[in-house]
Image: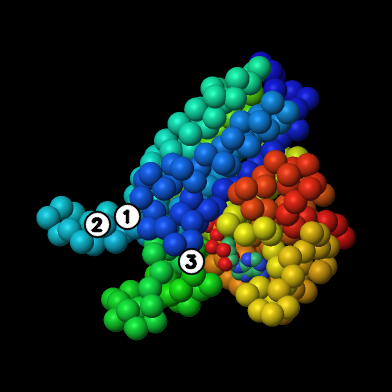
């Protein structure tokens, strides 16, 4: 069955931070409300595209970790299990909000929705295990951060806990995802960058890490063969001199320019850095379109009216 054949395949990677806006604490009401706008756009785009939706989980998985650290009455869960929990929790939130958006819009064709638990293979010798760099959970003042029992790093959002973030090597369910897309299902997968696993002989074994969802999404986009890759976050795109007096959002940058700006520190690790790296990897390997945009402008980004596009050469 190839019902979706002919429609271009679009992968939208939704930022975990985009679900909790600046100044919000991240109640479920806030997160469901924030999801409405991106999901209305995804619903509209489903008429013209086959869609894969991935999402981050940095605030959510960090919050879960904090929650369980507040309680010693039951066994603590490893990070990989918490990532799996956020895939379930956020899969439900995305799917139900999208379902409502599709129903409310009265669209002609309504795609079936599937949320898929997904694992992503990493290398057990990845140097990232020795150097935690992925910010998760809430942000703290520098005074509070210096008294916390775990490593933190200064980010654009304040001091945040950091965990190991090894590079994604392959998405285990890539063939299943491709089949579902070909059957015109809209697939929500690779939540939180995927459950991190290493191969041990013939089996997979979960590891304590959070994979960057932008890099995991680029890997999936390449492995599944998508036509357009949109990375949707809480800013308009990639800017030079971000936060400074000469801040300038880019509408496009070539692969060569992107590499140069990465090297000169315009796009820091743990936030804009992996988005630009992900777009670069995808464009370099496929020659297809990659755009970094705001969650408010996903449809515009697909229509080349917003965002920062990474273009060859
Ligand atoms: P997400 O949850 O969408 O992955 P991140 O916090 O990881 O969000 O990345 C988006 C953030 O990157 C923005 O909120 C912004 O503070 C930060 N940022 C850092 N450098 C830049 C830059 N050069 N251009 C735009 N945003 C940047
Ligand atoms: Mg991020």
Q: Nearer the viewer, mark 1 or mark 3?
A: 1
Side of 301 where 68 appears, left or right: left
In the rendered structure, which disc, 1 or 3, sits on the residue that comes first in sequence? 1
Q: Which residue is mark 1?
A: 64
For the C terminus, which image quadrant? bottom right
Q: Residue at x 69, y 64 (%)?
A: 238
Whether tag 2 and tag 1 are in contact, CB under 8 A, the answer is yes
SS type, badge 3: strand
Q: CA distance from mark 1 to mark 3?
A: 16 Å
The x, y position of residue 191, in whole percent, is: 49, 46
Q: Which residue is mark 2?
A: 68
In the rendered structure, which disc, 3 or 2, sits on the residue that comes first in sequence? 2
Instruction: Please determine whether, in this image, residue 187 is positioned above or below residue 223.
Output: above
Q: Which residue is mark 3?
A: 134
For the N terminus, which image quadrant? top right
Instruction: Please determine whether, in this image, residue 58 is positioned above or below residue 304.
Output: below
């Amino acid at each position: 069955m190839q019902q979706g054949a002919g429609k271009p395949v679009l992968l939208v990677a939704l930022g975990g931070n985009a679900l909790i806006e600046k100044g919000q604490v991240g109640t479920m009401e806030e997160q469901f409300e924030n999801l409405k706008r991106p999901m209305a756009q995804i619903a509209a785009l489903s008429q013209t595209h086959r869609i894969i939706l991935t999402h981050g989980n940095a605030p959510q998985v960090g919050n879960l970790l904090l929650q369980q650290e507040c309680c010693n009455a039951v066994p603590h869960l490893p990070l990989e299990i918490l990532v799996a929990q956020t895939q379930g929790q956020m899969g439900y939130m995305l799917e139900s909000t999208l379902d409502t958006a599709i129903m409310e819009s009265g669209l002609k064709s309504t795609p079936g929705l599937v949320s898929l638990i997904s694992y992503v293979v990493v290398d057990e010798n990845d140097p990232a295990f020795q150097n935690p760099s992925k910010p998760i959970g809430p942000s703290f003042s520098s005074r509070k951060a210096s008294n916390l029992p775990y490593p933190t790093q200064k980010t654009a959002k304040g001091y945040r806990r950091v965990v190991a973030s090894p590079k994604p090597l392959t998405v285990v369910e890539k063939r299943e995802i491709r089949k579902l897309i070909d059957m015109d299902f809209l697939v929500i997968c690779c939540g939180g960058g995927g459950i991190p696993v290493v191969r041990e002989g013939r089996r997979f074994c979960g590891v304590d890490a959070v994979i960057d969802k932008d890099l995991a999404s680029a890997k999936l986009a390449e492995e599944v063969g998508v036509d357009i890759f949109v990375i949707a976050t809480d800013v308009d795109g990639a800017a030079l001199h971000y936060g400074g007096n000469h801040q300038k959002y880019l509408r496009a940058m070539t692969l060569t320019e992107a590499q140069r700006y990465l090297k000169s520190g315009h796009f820091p690790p743990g936030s804009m850095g992996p988005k630009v790296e992900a777009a670069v990897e995808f464009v370099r390997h496929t020659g297809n379109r990659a755009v970094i945009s705001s969650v408010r402008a996903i449809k515009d980004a697909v229509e080349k009216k917003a965002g920062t596009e990474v273009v060859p050469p």
